[in-house]
Image (cartoon, rainbow, N blue to C red):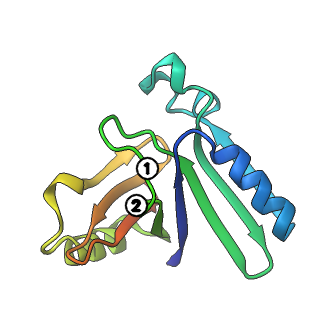
Amino acid sequence: MKLTPFLLFDGNCAEAMAFYHACFGGELTITKVGDSPMKGQHPPEQQNKVVYARLISGAIDLSATDGLHPTRTPQPGNTVCLYLSEATAMELRAIFEKLSEGADPTLLDPLREMPFGSYGHLADKYGVHWFFQGEKQG
């Protein structure tokens, strides 16, 4: 299991991650909505947005996305999150359930199966945003 920072952007994720890549070097991968298995789930105006970006440079491991939620827009104060990944669906479920105790129900996306594996999001009782991504449920 791995815990890393996760950044949310409002349409300029590719630009920001290219900037961080210029600062830190390393390997940058960017996947846009239109190039992903999720392209059919989003309208044409979102096809150029970044569904997932990752920069790895030495000990630096930074993930990011453009805000794709239909009702939540990234704003200063809610753009840095924690990203729990590389876990089994069972490991994610156990931690998700513990962290969701007292979580804001309006900011809770239950763990569910997506084309890329298990996914969920919550803001815990302290206001910290957590994103979860793991293997597909068997």
Seen from this angle, which residue lies furthest front? Answer: 76
17 shown above or below 57: above
Instruction: Answer whether labels 2 and 1 touch (C-beta < 8 Å).
Output: yes
On the image, the x and y values in percent for residue 31 come to 66, 41
State left or right for residue 35 relative to residue 73: right
On the image, the x and y values in percent for residue 98 come to 21, 78
Between residues 4 and 113, which one lies in front from this camera angle?
A: 4
On the image, the x and y values in percent for residue 79 come to 47, 59
> Is residue 137 something that shows in the picture?
no
Seen from this angle, which residue lies furthest top? Answer: 44
**What's the residue at 67%, 72% (across, down)?**
61
Disc 1 marks which amino acid?
Pro
Disc 2 marks which amino acid?
Asn
**What's the residue at 64%, 67% (across, down)?**
62
**What's the residue at 52%, 17% (across, down)?**
44
The quadrant holding residue 129 is bottom left
10 shown above or below 26: above
For label 1, count other residues whose C-alpha is less than 10 Å away and answer few (under 14), some (14-19) or many (20+).
some
For label 2, count other residues whose C-alpha is less than 10 Å away and answer few (under 14), some (14-19) or many (20+).
some
Q: Give me the C-alpha separation between circle 2 and circle 1.
A: 6 Å
Seen from this angle, which residue lies furthest bottom? Answer: 59
State left or right for residue 117 relative to residue 34: left
Tag 1's secondary structure?
A: loop
Residue assigned mark 2: 78
**What's the residue at 20%, 70% (across, down)?**
100
The quadrant holding residue 78 is bottom left
Between residues 61 and 1, which one lies in front from this camera angle?
A: 61
> Is residue 39 something that shows in the picture?
yes
Residue assigned mark 1: 74
State left or right for residue 70 relative to residue 29: left
